[in-house]
């Protein structure tokens, strides 16, 4: 049997392939036939490039239906997909090219010059382009000359399907290696658990370089043979405009906050909807409750990671239990979750500890980093999430059943801002390298829109004068803008404990306002 995940998706395409699979904001329809033929043409192109077995295909392109086809075609051709955040600048992208060694890079035509140069210096990949409109670029020009049929390349369940980079605590990103089994097991589980059907219509407004948009949302619709309303990016009023014709929406908490900020958003708009899913960052209980009051719908919060895909979910089916705000629900079928203390002993319900997970969804490890893989997996093969939580206990005055997981914090120095992860260590490295900077500390503070905002405290070298706006400007030239601190505080010294360790909790308290 061919375990290629694309083969599974294709086997679920509707019998009538003239139906619409993807519809854009401009009313352009992509039928299931179009998806079939479009992926065949790109897969034929990839095959004609004679990439080596296991080749990585990196994509740093704006969101378009063709960008999704590129992902699907890479799987179909038996290669490994490597999506990159479009906000990454040269230095960041260079690291990924060097580390992952892609054989092909697809980039926006506007970035062709620097991507080609960096590719020459790092991985010597072939470079093709795909424009934001999806209709032009050398990838499309060349794919259009290819046959519209392609025999999906056989893959084994443990063969690699994708590498998704996730920030590392040491300041360097690590690539989670995901197999065809990782993708198919989770997609099938969520298909059943969230009761997907061919009648669903998904509003797809998430970026497609992360697990949430590329896997959870897109796989859900594709596996159901359901239609996607495809937005290039999230825009609250556009989403509200589409909602009366849709049934499913998935978003990060920032998106729910922005929907609620729109006076037009309410019960009428949501009358046709059956499911709202939130994840990637903690959903505030106030947002959960306000949403219930305004729309009559209860957001379903779920929990996942790049390395593991989805782990836990509040129930869809009320027969399995209620959706409890502040919790991430129960371990998904086939996924095991345990909460352990510092010595690895299981915590009793209500006790807080480190969250560890196990299952067919958990990645095979980190790309070319066996030492990091060793660090993050226990000797008995469980993955240490770096999140801290408890089963059961009382959340916001409501006693949760012992099967419900609540995330109470993280034991990794990580900021989640609008659903994007920022590792302070990486940003501190960039700030410390700026002229006149002696040292810095980067931390997160609560933010009404992004949940958390990145903030820095910076100490000047003797004789230097640091200016906030100047530092921000220099950082914007080097790193993705969501990583750039929203505020920089120039301070005479950083607070330290008796051991000399910087007290980020003190900084957080001082600058939370
Ligand atoms: C944009 N900006 C951000 C930001 N997004 N700053 C901090 N955090 C963010 N998330 C910057 C912009 O560059 C701009 O900076 C300024 O903030 C205002 O931009 P905006 O126009 O308001 O932002 P917008 O483009 O609307 O983006 C907001 C957003 C987006 C929430 C729609 O961030 C987004 O799509 N987030 C989803 C992330 C996601 O998919 N995460 C899933 C990870 S998977 P300037 O300086 O240019 O003005 C994962 C596993 C799991 O975690 O469980 O799912
Ligand atoms: P990433 O590395 O980008 O995949 O982010 C994964 C991290 O996002 C997890 O380890 C959690 O810290 C966080 N996360 C995902 N979903 C939730 C959620 N529903 N509630 C709280 N944190 C979440």
Image: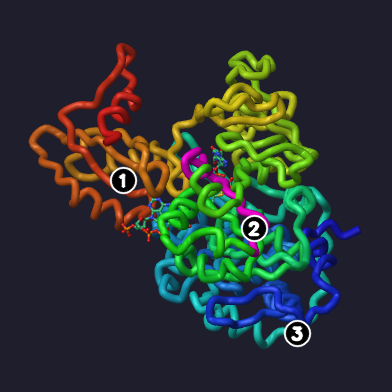
- Residue at left 39%, top 38%? 424
Alpha carbon separation for disc pair 2 and 3: 29 Å
Q: Tags 1 and 2 in contact by the CB under 8 Å rule?
A: no
Label number found at residue 147: 3
Residue 171 belongs to the span the image colors magenta: no
> Alpha carbon of mark 1 to alpha carbon of mark 3: how far?
48 Å
The numbered disc on residue 323 is none
Q: Which residue is painted at 31% across and 46% down in the image?
A: 485
For numbered disc 1, what is the local secondary structure?
loop
| Image position, residue 433 (x, y; %) | 27, 42
Q: Earlier in the sequence, mark 1 or mark 2?
A: 2
499 to the left or right of 69: left
Q: Quadrant of the N terminus?
A: bottom right
Secondary structure found at label 3: loop
What percent of the width, then of the height, locates residue 381? Answer: 73, 29
* Picture residue at 52% right of the left edge, 75% below the top: 129
Give the foreground label among 1 and 3: 1
Can residue 48 be seen in this snapshot? Answer: no
Residue 485: mark:
1
- Residue 153: quarter of image: bottom right
Horizontally, is 56 left or right of 121 in the view?
right
Which residue was labeled with disc 2? 217
- Crowding near pointer 1: few (<14 within 10 Å), some, many (20+)? many
Residue 35: x and y, percent? Answer: 71, 76
Find the residue positioned furthest to the left. 463
């Amino acid at each position: 049997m061919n375990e290629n995940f694309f083969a599974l998706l294709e086997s679920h395409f509707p019998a009538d392939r003239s139906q619409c699979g993807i519809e854009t904001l401009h009313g352009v329809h992509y039928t299931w036939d179009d998806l079939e033929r479009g992926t065949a043409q790109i897969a034929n192109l990839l095959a004609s490039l004679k990439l080596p077995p296991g080749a990585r295909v990196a994509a740093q392109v704006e969101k378009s239906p063709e960008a999704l086809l590129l992902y699907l075609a890479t799987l179909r051709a038996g290669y490994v997909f490597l999506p990159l955040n479009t906000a990454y600048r040269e230095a960041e992208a260079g690291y990924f090219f060097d580390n992952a060694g892609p054989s092909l890079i697809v980039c926006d035509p506007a970035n062709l010059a620097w991507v080609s140069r960096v590719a020459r210096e790092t991985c010597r990949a072939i470079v093709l382009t795909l424009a934001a409109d999806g209709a032009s670029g050398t990838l499309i020009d060349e794919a259009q000359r290819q046959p519209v049929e392609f025999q999906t390349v056989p893959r084994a369940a443990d063969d690699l399907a994708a590498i998704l980079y996730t920030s590392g605590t040491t300041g360097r990103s690590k690539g989670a290696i995901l197999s065809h089994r990782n993708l198919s097991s989770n997609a099938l589980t969520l298909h059943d658990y969230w009761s997907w059907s061919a009648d669903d219509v998904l509003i797809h407004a998430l970026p497609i370089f992360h697990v949430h948009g590329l896997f959870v949302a897109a796989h859900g619709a594709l596996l159901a043979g359901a239609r996607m309303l495809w937005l290039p990016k999230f825009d609250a009023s556009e989403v509200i405009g589409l909602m009366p014709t849709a049934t499913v929406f998935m978003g990060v908490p920032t998106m729910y906050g922005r929907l609620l900020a729109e006076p037009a958003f309410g019960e009428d708009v949501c009358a046709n909807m059956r499911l709202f899913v939130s994840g990637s960052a903690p959903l505030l209980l106030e947002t959960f409750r306000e949403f219930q009051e305004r729309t009559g719908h209860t957001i379903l919060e779920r929990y996942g990671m790049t390395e593991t895909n989805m782990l836990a979910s509040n129930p869809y089916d009320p027969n399995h239990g209620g959706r409890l705000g502040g919790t991430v629900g129960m371990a998904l079928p086939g996924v095991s979750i345990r909460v352990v203390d510092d010595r690895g002993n299981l915590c009793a319900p209500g006790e807080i500890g480190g969250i560890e997970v196990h299952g067919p969804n958990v990645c095979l490890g980190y790309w070319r980093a066996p030492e990091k893989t060793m660090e993050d997996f226990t000797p008995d093969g469980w993955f240490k999430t770096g999140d801290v939580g408890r089963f059961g206990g009382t959340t916001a005055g409501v006693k949760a059943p012992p099967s419900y997981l609540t995330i109470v914090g993280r034991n990794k120095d990580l900021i989640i801002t609008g659903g994007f992860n920022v590792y302070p260590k990486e940003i501190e490295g960039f700030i410390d390298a700026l002229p006149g900077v002696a040292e810095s500390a980067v931390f997160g503070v609560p933010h009404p829109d992004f949940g958390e905002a990145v903030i820095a405290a910076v100490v000047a070298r003797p004789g230097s004068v640091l200016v906030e706006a100047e530092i921000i400007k220099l950082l914007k030239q080097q790193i993705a803008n969501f990583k750039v601190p929203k505020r920089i505080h120039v301070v005479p010294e950083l607070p330290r404990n008796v051991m000399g360790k910087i007290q980020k909790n003190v900084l957080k308290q001082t600058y939370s306002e």
